[in-house]
Amino acid sequence: MTEPSNPRRPKRGTWAPQPETAALLRVSGNTINGVGETTPRRPSPFFWHPPDQHPWGELQLLARKNSRNCPGSTEAFQGAYAYPDLAPVAEARNESSPRELAEAVRAFALFHEADDLGIAPMDPLYVFEGYAIGHPWVIVLALAHNYERLREVPSDETNGIGVCDVGDQYARGTRSSYGLANWIRSQGYHADPYPGPMAGALLLIPPAIAAGLGELGKHGSLISPRFGAGVRLAGVTTDMPLIPTASIRFGADEFCSTCQVCTQACPPGAITPDKQMVRGVEKWYVNFDKCIPYFAEAASCGICIAECPWTRPAVRPKLLTTMARRIGKE
């Protein structure tokens, strides 16, 4: 089940941030993220929001500066920030049934670069504090990584393959989310896109899980039964009447409870073996204060999702079969 790791990656426990990097982490991100809180609440703006909305602006700028040193990374991310214009909402409205509209949404999205799609009712807990979304539906788009390129993370001044693939998938997320939002607007309904990598109003992983795109992994990322953890997300919110897709359980959560691959692969030791209480929900959580300094110095990361057994194309089918058998016996 194992494959050779990228030899450029430091081993767990061998890395520590430079003093000047550590000095930029002036406030604990774990506290802002709500670790230990027992009451559900909306998430607070964090590292990938505009720097005036959180206390790590200088650390964010360091991460951007280092990522630009990776060959091809600037060009790869240009598409992620090339936001098309939003079309006006058409006066004539498509009066098809919610099921027909949901099917049309899926067909359009899959034909316009998305690799998978889920639909969930809006939940106020999906919206960051200080933001507002008035639409009743969330459409989440999944964009799959190229596994062979993803395996090259983290990138550096000689090899930008890994970070370039991250940029390419975010660019696809921008194009696909704006394309779908504009198509929905052409049908007479309101819609707004929410691509990455910069965070906006919408939290993406919780509605993705609710919409059946996967389960939360120990590394804090979505695990898809189709793509493993090698997937990026984009969203569209809308008032178009739709039919939700159901959440799924395929054994990723149970597998993570005993698997130690990402825990051992994480150079700063940010992935813990047990779930934690975060804003009233017991779930897998990655230590922000350990993860982000490494991310900033390494010009991005992604080691945990690249090393995840679910991400490996040759391993995933066997895991699906094994875990289906295991959870079927419960």
Image (cartoon, helix red, strand yellow):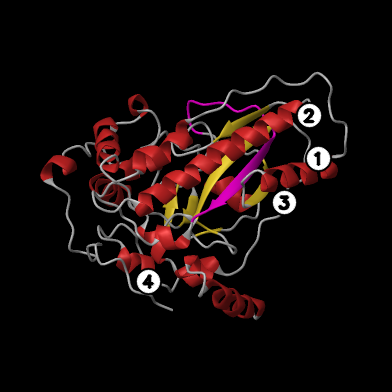
Task: Name the residue rendered at 47%, 38% in the picture.
Answer: 43
SS class of the residue under badge 3? loop
User: Would you call the spot at circle 3 few (<14 residues within 10 Å), some (14-19), or many (20 or more)?
Assistant: some
**Residue 83 percent coordinates (x, y):** 52, 28
Q: Which mark is residue 260?
A: 4
Q: Quadrant of the C terminus?
A: bottom right
The kind of residue on which mark 2 rests is Gln
Mark 2–mark 3 CB contact (< 8 Å): no
Magenta segment includes 144: yes
Residue nearest the viewer, comparing 311 with 122: 311
Q: Residue at x 32, y 42 (%)?
A: 29
Q: CA distance from mark 2 to mark 1?
A: 10 Å
Disc 1 versus disc 3: nearer the observer:
1
Q: Nearer the viewer, mark 4 or mark 2?
A: 2
Q: Which residues are magenta?
A: 128-145
Sooner in the amino-acid sequence: mark 4 or mark 3: 3
Q: CA distance from mark 4 to mark 3?
A: 31 Å
Q: Which residue is mark 2?
A: 187
- Could you say which is closer to the camera, residue 253 or residue 103? 103
Which residue is labeled 3 in the image? Answer: 245
- Calculate the distance from the C-alpha at mark 4 to the C-alpha at mark 2: 48 Å
Query: Residue 19's spot in the image, x, y percent?
Result: 11, 44
In the rendered image, which residue does mark 1 sit on?
101
